[in-house]
Image: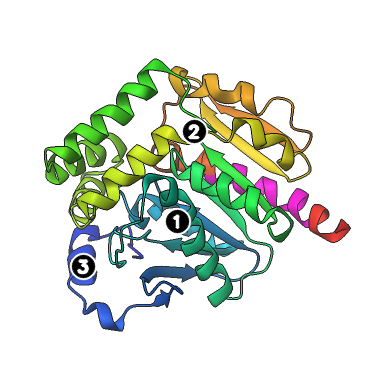
């Protein structure tokens, strides 16, 4: 959903009303249509959103298309993508990994970089653990391998409770307001969030709350990774301890920043990704 600086709202409304059959989709082996957008050429960088928000939370990362191929997609049950429930909570994240693999294979993306934002990073980590040698690298924005903070615990519980109360509209408003840079951002994020399937969002919160990849992180020791935190995001950046010992992982703090780095700190966030690319190129050349 490419938005220009002028008349953002009108351009969004025009795009929002398009016939979905004219939009780009990938069909997964399980019969789910995944909506995606691709900008630029070069090394593919795939952005993975947290529950409810959809690909539009990465609208400021489209600027990276001058340097890489930017891939944005809606996870199952979000935005324009189709939905099929998982058989159990244990299958939720693995099913999202399978969806992401279908996208990568269908688009024939070689050595992609995965960028996971917030709990979207759990899907990035799960994919990296399953297909380490097929990736160029991983970037986590506000990332954690497990919920290890009382405030983060409460955030997950609030998300689950709001979905139980069928509060898609409420959660869309809250997340849009928290992430906006401009008033147009808030409109776009709120309207797109309302497209999410309540059960898909709830399942991601529940599965993310139970997920724990901390003991498996040493398997990613040789994979180039960047873990980015805001210095003011105290209850999230405490999770850095899980990544400290990884040889090819660098932890970066953005000063005076909170959690919403892809929007509020998009210039610094994008710069970190660009600066990461040469290391990825060196890594992939050695393999």
Q: Position of residue 35 (x, y in %)?
A: 36, 69
Quarter in which the N terminus is drawn: bottom left
User: Whole-Å distance between the Cαs marked 1 and 2?
Assistant: 19 Å
Determine the image quadrant of residue 28.
Answer: bottom left
Name the side, left or right, on which 176 lies relative to 71. left
Local secondary structure at mark 3:
helix
The boundaries of the magenta stretch are 270-281
Mark 1 crowd level (few <14, some 14–19, many ≥20, 10 Å Cα):
some
Mark toward the viewer: 1 or 3: 1
User: Whole-Å distance between the Cαs marked 1 and 3?
Assistant: 24 Å
47 or 184, nearer to the observer: 47
Q: Is residue 245 magenta?
A: no
Q: Which residue is mark 1?
A: 96
Mark toward the viewer: 2 or 3: 2
Is residue 246 something one can see in this rendering? yes
Mark 2 crowd level (few <14, some 14–19, many ≥20, 10 Å Cα):
many
User: Whole-Å distance between the Cαs marked 2 and 3?
Assistant: 29 Å
Majority secondary structure of magenta residues: helix
Q: Which residue is mark 3?
A: 16
Q: Which residue is mark 2?
A: 142
Compared to 15, does 199 lie above or below? above
Q: Position of residue 234 (x, y in %)?
A: 46, 17
Q: Position of residue 79 (x, y in %)?
A: 28, 61
Visual colour scheme: rainbow
Point out the tag, 1 or 2, that comes first from the N-terminus: 1
Local secondary structure at mark 1:
helix
Compared to 76, does 165 lie above or below? above
130 or 6, nearer to the observer: 130
Point out the tag, 1 or 3, that comes first from the N-terminus: 3
Q: Across the whole image, how many numbered discs are drawn on residues?
A: 3
């Amino acid at each position: 959903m490419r938005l220009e600086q002028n008349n953002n709202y009108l351009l969004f409304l025009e795009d929002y009303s398009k016939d979905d059959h004219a939009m780009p989709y990938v069909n997964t082996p399980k019969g789910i249509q995944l909506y995606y957008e691709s900008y630029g050429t070069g090394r593919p960088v795939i952005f993975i959103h947290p529950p409810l928000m959809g690909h539009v939370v990465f609208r400021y990362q489209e600027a990276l298309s001058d340097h890489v191929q930017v891939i944005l997609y809606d996870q199952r049950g979000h935005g324009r993508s189709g939905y099929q429930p998982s058989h159990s909570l244990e299958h939720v994240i693995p099913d999202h990994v399978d969806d992401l693999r279908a996208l990568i294979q269908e688009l024939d993306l070689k050595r992609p970089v995965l960028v996971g934002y917030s709990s979207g990073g759990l899907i990035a980590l799960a994919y990296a653990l399953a297909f380490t040698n097929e990736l160029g690298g991983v970037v986590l924005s506000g990332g954690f391998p497990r919920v290890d903070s009382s405030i983060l615990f409460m955030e997950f519980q609030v998300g689950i409770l709001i979905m139980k109360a069928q509060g898609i509209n409420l959660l869309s408003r809250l997340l849009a307001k928290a992430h906006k840079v401009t008033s147009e951002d808030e409109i776009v994020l709120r309207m797109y969030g309302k497209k999410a399937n309540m059960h898909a969002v709830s399942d991601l919160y529940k599965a993310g709350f139970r997920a724990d990849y901390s003991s498996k992180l040493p398997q990613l020791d040789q994979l180039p990774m960047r873990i980015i935190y805001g210095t003011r995001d105290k209850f999230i950046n405490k999770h850095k301890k899980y990544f400290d010992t990884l040889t090819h992982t660098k932890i970066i703090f953005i000063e005076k920043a909170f959690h919403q780095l892809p929007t509020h700190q998009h210039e610094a966030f994008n710069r970190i990704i660009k600066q990461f690319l040469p290391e990825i190129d060196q890594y992939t050349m050695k393999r």
